[in-house]
Amino acid sequence: MTEKRIPWDQYFMLQAVLLSLRSTCNRLAVGAILVRDKRIIAGGYNGSVSGDDHCLDAGCYIVDGHCLRTIHAEMNAVLQCAKFGVATADAEVYVTDFPCLQCTKMLLQAGIKKIYYLRNYHNDDYAVRLLKLKNVAVSQVKIDKEYLHMVAASQLKISLDD
């Protein structure tokens, strides 16, 4: 008997959730996955510049209500592509939280054609307007509990087999 396969959108979103577990931000853990042709081309989570203090260790560096120390997950994913020479044009992003205005503009400039997100998070009206202007599709992904149970069962099997 074959178990039901997880749909692509939920599979990639769970990958973004998994990446968010690496976040070093005290305020919100975010993960992002860039995908092209059903293949992950990059991933990122929110955290500090490599070599700098992490918010988890030194606290957030807050100015005007924003942590200046943190690089957002979407930006880290796009920067990973830049660092390793991977094109972002026509890719899709799966991100745990609706992108902020700055990340929305960056994703548009990077040529992202579709944004999938898990949770609403201070959805900026201007960001939504820009996405419509550029005809970038936006879709909220709901993760079915059955897949979370499958992940938990798989992890339980791994720990029992160790």
Image: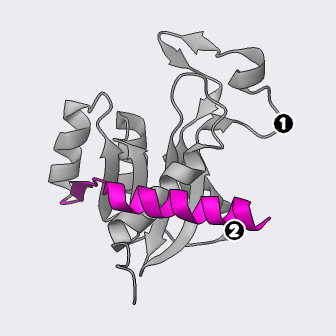
Q: Position of residue 143 (x, y in %)?
A: 33, 55
Position of residue 78 measured from the top left corner of the image (x, y, whole percent)? 54, 56
Q: Secondary structure at mark 1?
A: loop
Q: Residue at the location (61% across, 60% down)?
A: 155
Q: Main secondary structure of the magenta part?
A: helix
Asked if 149 appears above or below 7 in the picture, the reply is: above
**Any mark on residue 84, and which?**
2
Q: Nearer the viewer, residue 142 or 42?
A: 142
Residue at left offset 46%, top offset 64%: 150
Q: Residues within 10 Å of mark 2 (few under 14, many from 20)?
A: few
Give the magenta part as a residue range.
135-162
Residue depicted at 53% across the width and 61% down the height: 153
Q: Nearer the viewer, mark 1 or mark 2?
A: 1
The residue closer to the viewer here, 121 or 82, is 121
For residue 115, the mark is none
Q: Secondary structure at mark 2?
A: helix
